[in-house]
Amino acid sequence: MENPKVAILMGSTSDAAVMGVAAQVLDDFGVPYEMRVLSAHRTPHETSRYAAEAEERGIQVLIGGAGMAAHLAGALAAHSTLPVLGIPLTGSSLQGLDALLSTAQMPGGIPVATMSLGKAGAKNAGLFAVQILARQDTELNQKFKDYRKKMRQDILNTVLD
Amino acid sequence: MENPKVAILMGSTSDAAVMGVAAQVLDDFGVPYEMRVLSAHRTPHETSRYAAEAEERGIQVLIGGAGMAAHLAGALAAHSTLPVLGIPLTGSSLQGLDALLSTAQMPGGIPVATMSLGKAGAKNAGLFAVQILARQDTELNQKFKDYRKKMRQDILNTVLD
Amino acid sequence: MENPKVAILMGSTSDAAVMGVAAQVLDDFGVPYEMRVLSAHRTPHETSRYAAEAEERGIQVLIGGAGMAAHLAGALAAHSTLPVLGIPLTGSSLQGLDALLSTAQMPGGIPVATMSLGKAGAKNAGLFAVQILARQDTELNQKFKDYRKKMRQDILNTVLD
Amino acid sequence: MENPKVAILMGSTSDAAVMGVAAQVLDDFGVPYEMRVLSAHRTPHETSRYAAEAEERGIQVLIGGAGMAAHLAGALAAHSTLPVLGIPLTGSSLQGLDALLSTAQMPGGIPVATMSLGKAGAKNAGLFAVQILARQDTELNQKFKDYRKKMRQDILNTVLD
Amino acid sequence: MENPKVAILMGSTSDAAVMGVAAQVLDDFGVPYEMRVLSAHRTPHETSRYAAEAEERGIQVLIGGAGMAAHLAGALAAHSTLPVLGIPLTGSSLQGLDALLSTAQMPGGIPVATMSLGKAGAKNAGLFAVQILARQDTELNQKFKDYRKKMRQDILNTVLD
Amino acid sequence: MENPKVAILMGSTSDAAVMGVAAQVLDDFGVPYEMRVLSAHRTPHETSRYAAEAEERGIQVLIGGAGMAAHLAGALAAHSTLPVLGIPLTGSSLQGLDALLSTAQMPGGIPVATMSLGKAGAKNAGLFAVQILARQDTELNQKFKDYRKKMRQDILNTVLD
Amino acid sequence: MENPKVAILMGSTSDAAVMGVAAQVLDDFGVPYEMRVLSAHRTPHETSRYAAEAEERGIQVLIGGAGMAAHLAGALAAHSTLPVLGIPLTGSSLQGLDALLSTAQMPGGIPVATMSLGKAGAKNAGLFAVQILARQDTELNQKFKDYRKKMRQDILNTVLD
Amino acid sequence: MENPKVAILMGSTSDAAVMGVAAQVLDDFGVPYEMRVLSAHRTPHETSRYAAEAEERGIQVLIGGAGMAAHLAGALAAHSTLPVLGIPLTGSSLQGLDALLSTAQMPGGIPVATMSLGKAGAKNAGLFAVQILARQDTELNQKFKDYRKKMRQDILNTVLD
């Protein structure tokens, strides 16, 4: 997409199914984004450079998803002053407890906004990016309020057999 | 302060020392905020109303800190469409693992941006609020970049005996 | 059912299979109940109102089941003075440890009676609701004693091959 | 006290400071109770007999507090059909995680209503016993509502320096 | 079997496949045993009586296997002075961590000898019962030494492709 | 002592205060024992040899206490066919969870009877050794029964203020 | 292979599929190795002797993989002064948390270099062995640098659909 | 020191007391090293550059110690092909579980050799660095063997009171 406002990064194509949930949310809200495979450990230079150059390319929010010793969001936060959202992924045998602690327990000074584990977290990262962008975009803000109303109504319409 | 842009909420005055770290960060950046004691469980109506009315009062970011079954940030997120930052506090005998999971594991649809446990998290919540506000405030964005440069320089100036 | 004495609440229809175990217990004891989908996070107003009005509608016990950052039982307890039973559900990748801590670790002042994880907890919530109601219903109390005798006898009749 | 309605049991005098918090709540509400040291492991016969005879002595709620492999509440529940509240205590090196799981994870059929760890749990056990008794005592129910209003007001009166 | 020397107890027939591994070991060593379904929570009187009478019936070792809030081995230890071996079972969503802590963390004064989780634990309980009995049975002691030699030889004979 | 029947082993003199609790129990029951500092990792040959020669020296039970990656009890079990009791010690920052899992989770074939963490476990190891020896010593068996009666009576004599 | 420089040891043939990943890495780098089934608990003498004699046979690095109370790497480290790499395996119901703590938490004085859980750890053990050997082998060092470049390039070549 | 062969890195001067234990070991073995404060998050460029240039400066082993979301060792491993040893530090409220998982659970392809938590880990990192260097230094290898003999003798000389 042209002029992406959000970047969705993941360390491996095997994470694409989960991270695609964040992309779908942004599509639904009409927010332009780009999605890349970049690894904190295997392509550290490219990851640093991407993070460092994102702001001047017009990107407003960085989203990083990783499992195990999940360093991607932290690496993005180290190389950029943009808000960084971290999604701990659950592929490891420890079922994401490792990724959750590796993402959430950032030292004072370099925040990462940690979302829930896995797909719920990917969805919430997309929504939280919208909430940040909506601070300066009245129309997007209204769309978000409408989304929440619809979510509420969907539950109220639920019929238990 | 007049025209607060950030609200810092906690469930008890016993959390004020930790949550004050977030306030100090906002003071350092010149961001107006207000700080309140409101409990998701003991004053649920006032908490809901506060969250629901915050946006029209000009508040842009909500920060909630709580320990144990830490529901405050989630309750704020349920009643507002503003971005909500959650700080899991560590006072319980489980040392905050309960608060971390209660804050981070939000269901898909209602994001809470979870920070680290305790004081590091309070500091990072203050900084992350600045990062969000800086999306629409060039001067604040520059201050944040300067802050990061200074942090970097402080470490490079370190001398080990 | 008319004049329900117990309310069984859950955040999503996907929890209905587990929560239905509590309903089955109440059916077996002839206790009228109602079952609703209401979310602490996605329908907070309706959840609050439901909890606040339950007592005057004749409901005596509230049962809430939720997974992940399981706030439903806590939200019910915040808005009602009825006894609230919480069932931590196990759908998340952390297998319910998150839900168990989010349900059990309530702050002093707002109790939630936490049951076991998942189906065993749903069964026990149904039984515990019966035990509360049986304080003022001699016949129900006798039924509960008979149930326990039968459970005991079933085990004593067990034959290992 | 004469005609106790609640029994507070603990395995050792070293638990008396924590369990006394439950007693204090009952004192505040004017609910008669008795408090005993009885161990599921060291005095199993006396514990069983106490539980089995409690109902005919007029007791309506049993509260058991224990640490480590906390079996006391479960043993009470096995020998009585009264509602049993369990308070996991935190004295062990695992800080109560052992007691929490040993108390909460009861098998289907024999419920224990688990409260928070330690003093918050003891307070909540006292309150939850009041909530159960208030089902059949209008005056007590009103006292409980007044208690909750005062708790709410205390928070709203809070002044942060 | 006549004159059983070891008793293998479990709370439910659903545990029979795992507990049968202990029985198989005793069969292999020619040690007579009996196997019963008895629950600490659902048949507490029968469990107590069984434990209390086991020694005079000639039983030398009690083995109890249970999952979740695994109280069976502790209940046996409370009602008998025979050595009690506990096998934490893994059926719960917490994968046996609850059963392990509930079995191992017995208070000072009432030991339970805890084995590994699940089938490995059942096998080891059978072997450990043999080791206890072998203190007073030279022939059994020699069989155990032979068993260990064979186990060693089996590994040394392993051929990797 | 001459003709020790129990050996108490630990990896470091810093464990002597805890392990001394096991020795005290054996002193109280008049069971001769010896106590040694031997490490599975730092003196592996001496540890192996000690374990291998213990039986022919008349020792009937081996007790090993260790913290962190607690291999001592497992190493004793690997080199002897005597029953081995393991006491997980709590000195590490993980508060003994590491030692508990390292001691309890032995593979099928080589049992270690795991006791509670720390001093409670040391006490229970002493008692369990007595229970094993009492299988072939009527007088010791009676002493153990008397000990349990006294423990029970001590609790029944408890007076709460 | 002749003149193996690395030894890959495991406690059971059931671990061969995971441990074979380490072997494959060494094959890819042309490093000679040997692979053996030896158990810390079931063949302790052979394991000790193997470790003790490895250095004089020209082996430079020992790799041990084990699950549950994973003592193999620690046992190798106790009997050799070669660098030992430990791979915690995930077969147990605790999903490797037991193996991770049993491998990593070695006491001061006897290091084990712990890798990730399961296959990722086996791969990394192979790579780390190469990194150690490359200290004295310029060609191997270059191969390793080439491997890393290729890994980086593979990620950069990734195309998301 | 001139011509350092080992680099000891930490994120903050508050880690110097623990990391100094590694330095002390290298001093004892006469291995030249250098010690620096560099943060993966706060000085990412300097950390990358340091790691990338270390090999050509003659450094053979990198040691990184960090707490919480401990990324330092992983960042060093991402930017260098030297062997990297990671020491998880224990300062956080989660007592190092976060640092242990963040250090150990590296993805396949980028190994970090994880040591024990805290001071034991720092000591072992120093020793493991010596073991790596000793592969190509006969004298150092002999010193290491002597060190191990002395450690063994110290334990054998232990006298329990």
Image (tube, coloured by chain):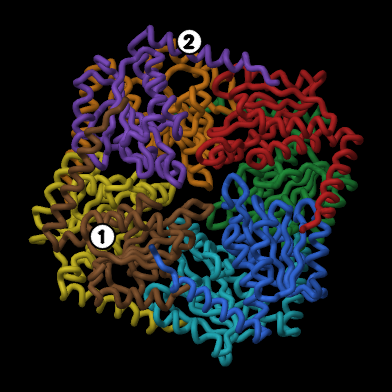
Chain colours: A red, B green, C blue, D cyan, E brown, F yellow, G purple, H orange
Asked whether, in this view, residue H102 is left or right of residue E115, the answer is right
Q: Is residue B136 above or below residue F136?
A: above
Asked whether, in this view, residue D132 is left or right of residue F139, the answer is right
Q: Is residue E23 above or below residue C159?
A: above
Of residues E40 and B95, the one nearer the viewer is: E40
Place residue A140 in its image quadrant: top right
Of residues G57 and B1, the one nearer the viewer is: G57
Q: Amino acid at mark 1?
A: Ala
Residue G88 in the image: x percent, y percent?
40, 36
Q: Are marks 2 and 1 on the same chain?
A: no
Q: Which numbered marker is on residue G146?
A: 2
Report how far apart the C-alphas of labels 2 and 1 lie in the structure: 57 Å
User: Which quarter of the image is occupied by the N terminus of chain F?
Assistant: bottom left
Residue D155 in the image: x percent, y percent?
74, 64
Residue A136 in the image: x percent, y percent?
87, 33
The residue carrying mark 1 is E129
Of residues H50 and D56, the one nearer the viewer is: D56
Q: Is residue G143 above or below residue C114?
A: above
Q: Chain of mark 1?
A: E
Q: Secondary structure at mark 1?
A: helix
Neighbor class of circle 1 (other Cα within 10 Å; few <14, some 14-19, many 20+) is: many
Residue H152 in the image: x percent, y percent?
20, 38
**Residue farthest toward the bottom in the current orientation of the protein:** D2
Place residue F69 in its image quadrant: top left
Kindly check if marks 2 and 1 are in contact, taking CB atoms under 8 A apart as contact. Answer: no
Q: Is there any visible trace of residue H85 in the rendered image?
A: no
Q: Residue at x 55, y 89 (%)?
A: D56
Q: Residue at x 56, y 69 (%)?
A: D111
